[in-house]
Image (cartoon, rainbow, N blue to C red):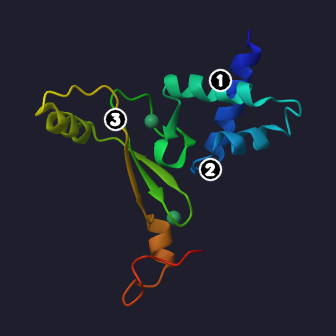
Amino acid sequence: MTTPGEQMQADVLAILRRRNVALSAYKVLEALRDAHPKIAPPAVYRALSSLTSKGQAHRVESLKAYVACQSKVHASASILSICESCGYVEEHLAGEVVEAVSHVVAETGFSSQHHVIEVHGICAACNARMPAPEGVGAGGSPQ
Ligand SMILES: [Zn+2]
Ligand SMILES: [Zn+2]
């Protein structure tokens, strides 16, 4: 038995898995409209929050968007690298880094509950396509 909620989660996850690019809830909603013409935003938000709480998807806080989890269910937070050029989001598992961050903040008595580690930059594929950045303004063009 699949409940309508579970079916919606499966459909949302399928959309997120199509490409490793972060999608906003609105983009997910638009993509779902083909299969579910009458879909309402709360149904999408509910599905996204269930998927993130189960670890099947992750919220990219700095983009206010979502990606499918790229590895098996993992115990510690993952590090997300986000390509500023093509939007490719890659998930890196480095529990020791997350632990190190916890240690740093613990020095002032802070106890961590939830880590968000997101790195913005240029992915390997885009780096390979781009000319060497010598002499070009490091700020990048506004395209
Ligand atoms: Zn993950
Ligand atoms: Zn890229």
Q: Residues within 10 Å of mark 3 (few under 14, many from 20)?
A: some
Q: Which x, y percent locates residue 16?
A: 63, 41
Element on which disc 3 rests: loop
Identify residue for label 2. Answer: 19
> Relative to the observer, which residue lies in front, 18 or 37?
37
Cβ at disc 3 under 8 Å from ligand 1: no
Q: Which residue is mark 1?
A: 46
Q: Secondary structure at mark 2?
A: loop
Disc 3 marks a residue whose amino acid type is His
Residue at 47% from the left image edge and 48% from the top image edge: 62
On the image, the x and y values in percent for residue 6 come to 69, 18
Q: CA distance from mark 3 to mark 2?
A: 24 Å
| Of the pair 110 and 52, the residue shown nearer to us | 110
Residue 69 appears in view: no
- Specify whether tag 2 is near ligand 2 (CB below 8 Å): no
Q: Left of 43 or right of it: where is 23?
A: left
Q: Secondary structure at mark 1?
A: helix
Question: Closer to the N terminus: mark 3 or mark 1?
Answer: 1
Camera-side mark, 3 or 2: 3
